[in-house]
Image (spheres, helix red, strand yellow):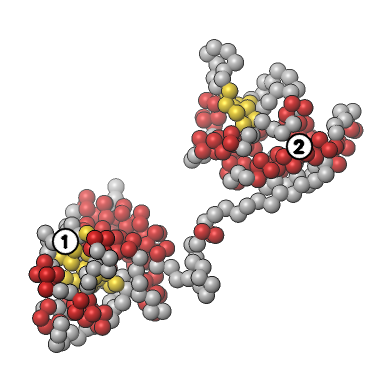
Amino acid sequence: MLTRGYLIGQIVDDLAGIAAQARQRGRLHLFDLHIHVEDFAKEVLNRVLGLHLTNLNAERSNNPGLDLGDPAGKWAFQVTADKTTAKVKATLEKMDALQRLKYPNVRILVIGEKQGSYEFTGEPFASAGFTADMVWDFNDVCGRLMSLPIDTLVDLQSYVSKETRRVRIELEIPDEDGRFPTGIDNLVEALPTPRLSDAAKFVAYYEAKDTPIEREQAEAVIAELSKRLAVLPRLTREVFKFLVERRDASKAGFHDDFRMSDPKLRRIYRGDDLDGDLALLSEARLIDLNDPDNHGEAYYWSTRFPGRTHGYHDLIVDYLTDLGIDLRKPFITLDFSDF
């Protein structure tokens, strides 16, 4: 059972991580915030304060002075990474008479850490009745967590946990070349580099067994198999290797494709997106879904190796098995150098 202490601790830790990243941006005078950060602050404040804030910038780009507003609750916030007195002053000066009337409760929310102290004298602070305790950061927000109902804490912790990574990505600092730590280059699987062969070892092996095969044909089969596998994600290639390795034992003849019944596959494979992998393998012309052979039997998947009409699926797998070469090497890492 989740306790109040656990929930509050998780929320505080996540918000502290966001604040630390924003402080680093502030040291470099990077004060611009993506609208997603504003929306994150909106959702947190709504849950903590019981408000119905909306993003005013979504209604009017660069809404003067304020970012979030709840006309019914009469609350508004400027969300900023700039903690300076000058920023507070600029925000208040941009507010027009209508905004002052609509939002008597205005706060500045610093994404990061506010200053240790503020001295607000003269205008526009006096006419707005704005005091130092109206500048908040996440510490002020967290100070209000203890009084929240447990259901609200559960909802808030779930939301903050889900969105923290995205917010921190928006606060990342690019390097001198404009690359971000979590840029797409770090999120996309690298393209594999196949290692092919001229099939000389493969051909020599079967000649020694009095089962001659044509070298040019064997080389072409290996190249085509590598080509079809190379376009697939690694995990999908793993599924192909799994289908071959755990295939059903019974086959009617040498030229029959490897097969695995669909119910068996779904009971022994526990991956997250089997249907997606099967679709990709089908698109690459490496497997097919087949109707049952007889009434009452199951649908089954069959592999579609290049050169399968000449029995190359058997030739390749038997060769690998006899030489003790893991199927992972050619089918997943695309290293066909043993051929």
Q: Which of pointers 1 and 2 lies earlier in the amino acid sequence?
A: 1
Distance between the Cα atoms at labels 1 and 2? 67 Å
Residue that mark 2 sits on: 221
Instruction: Report crowding for label 1: few under 14, some 14 to 19, many 20 or more residues within 10 A (C-alpha).
Output: some
Residue of label 1: 70
Q: Quadrant of the C terminus?
A: top right
Tell me where residue 100 sits by quadrant: bottom left
- Vertical placement of 199 versus 34: above or below? above
The amino acid on which the numbered mark 1 sits, given as a three-letter code, is: Asp
- As helix, strand or loop, the secondary structure at mark 2 comes to helix
Q: Is 54 or 134 nearer to us in this picture?
A: 54
Is the residue under label 2 in contact with that under label 1 (CB below 8 Å)? no
Locate residue 5, reporting x and y percent. 27, 58
Residue plotted at (62% across, 45% down): 231
At 12% across and 64% down in the image, what residue appears? 74
* Amino acid of disc 2: Val
Q: Position of residue 238 (x, y in %)?
A: 61, 41
Q: Residue at 74% of width from left, 31% of height from top? A: 307
Name above or below for residue 192 compared with residue 25.
above
Q: Which residue appears at 70% of the width and 43% of the height?
A: 226
> Residue 129, percent across and down?
11, 78
Question: Compared to 155, does 39 lie above or below?
Answer: below
Estimate the x, y position of residue 185 in percent, counting from the top left.
55, 60
**In this picture, residue 34 sits left or right of residue 147:** right
Residue 246 visible in rendering? no
Tell me the number on the disc at residue 156. none
Give 38 or 93, whichever is nearer the viewer. Answer: 93
Res. 166 in view: yes
Residue extending farthest to the bottom is 122
Q: Secondary structure at mark 1?
A: strand
Q: Quadrant of residue 80?
A: bottom left
111 over 3 or under it: above or below: below
